[in-house]
């Protein structure tokens, strides 16, 4: 039997703290257990090197995102080495091989018609000259008028779209963001509703809460998800 263990990929925008290391440890324990039993084990992980928080931190420091990701990736590798983690492969998402595989999957999904293009309204800050991720838009909640972020209101727990906020401001420069249309690819999850329902019905060896949560998502109806971002880093 071959055992594949995909560990969580730590985000390369800050040092690891004890909680993050603790959450990675069970994967290593399981890898060692199966190796001792004589099984063939493939235990992989890597540093998550893309995304908005990294590009924003790079802007702040006046360096390229690569400088930030190199700094923390090297720190992670050193930390895992000192702690004796036994990864068979520890890589990073900005490695050319990773890009190649992701692009291959993206193109396959496109060829099979499960990715489709749609124009969506996004918040855009003229002063920063960039589209803003949801949590970088701040304003007042349309339901309870408390101060809220673009993704949710912590006071009344409402999930929000940043364009619903009143008195919107850009978290980076305090300017007033506008809305702008932008083309994005969406993954048509709805097309998989029946297949996934059957899959969950036949689930074998799953934990109760995993089955319960999956059933809840399916009962509420699957939503198509944006698979692209307005971002030049990732
Ligand atoms: Zn609210
Ligand atoms: Zn701004």
Image: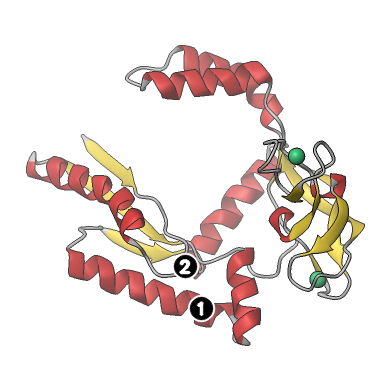
Q: Which residue is mark 2?
A: 12
* Distance from the alpha carbon under mark 1 to that under mark 2: 7 Å
Examine the rendered structure and indicate whether residue 59 appears above or below residue 163.
below
x%, y% of residue 26? 25, 45
Q: Which residue is mark 1?
A: 68
Using residue 44 as the reference point, say whether residue 172 is left or right of it. Answer: right
- Quarter occupied by residue 37: top left
Judge: label 2 CB < 8 Å from ligand 2. no
User: Considering the numbered disc 2 on the image, is that residue within a helix, a strand or a loop?
Assistant: loop
Please say if the residues under marks 1 and 2 sit with CB atoms less than 8 Å apart: yes
Q: Neighbour class for label 1 at 10 Å: few (<14), some, many (≥20)?
A: some
x%, y% of residue 179? 91, 56
**Mark nearer the N terminus (1 vs 2):** 2
Q: Residue at x 8, y 44 (%)?
A: 36
Examine the rendered structure and indicate whether residue 224 appears above or below residue 81.
above
User: Considering the numbered disc 1 on the image, is that residue within a helix, a strand or a loop?
Assistant: helix
**Quadrant of image for the C terminus:** bottom right
Using residue 54 as the reference point, say whether residue 211 is left or right of it. Answer: left
x%, y% of residue 76? 34, 69
Per the rendering, the mark at residue 118 is none
Q: Residue at x 53, y 79 (%)?
A: 66
């Amino acid at each position: 039997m071959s055992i594949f263990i995909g560990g969580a990929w730590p985000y390369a925008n800050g040092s690891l703290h004890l909680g993050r290391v603790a959450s990675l440890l069970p994967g290593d324990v399981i890898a060692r257990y199966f190796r001792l039993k004589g099984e063939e084990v493939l235990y992989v992980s890597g540093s998550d090197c893309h995304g908005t928080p990294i590009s924003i931190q790079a802007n702040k420091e006046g360096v390229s995102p690569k400088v930030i990701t190199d700094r923390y990736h090297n720190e992670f590798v050193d930390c895992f080495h000192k702690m004796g983690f036994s990864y068979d492969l520890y890589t990073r998402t900005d490695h050319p091989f990773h890009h190649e595989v992701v692009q291959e999957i993206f193109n396959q999904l496109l060829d099979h018609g499960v990715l489709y293009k749609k124009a969506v309204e996004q918040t855009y800050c003229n002063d920063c000259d960039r589209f803003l991720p949801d949590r970088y838009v701040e304003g007042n909640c349309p339901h309870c008028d408390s101060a809220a972020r673009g993704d949710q209101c912590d006071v009344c727990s409402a999930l929000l779209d940043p364009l619903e906020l009143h008195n919107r401001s850009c978290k980076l420069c305090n300017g007033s963001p506008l809305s702008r249309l932008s083309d994005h690819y969406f993954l048509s999850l709805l097309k998989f509703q029946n297949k996934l329902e059957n899959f969950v019905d036949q689930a074998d060896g799953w934990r109760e809460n995993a089955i319960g949560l999956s059933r809840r998502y399916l009962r509420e109806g699957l939503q198509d998800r944006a698979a692209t971002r307005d971002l030049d880093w990732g």
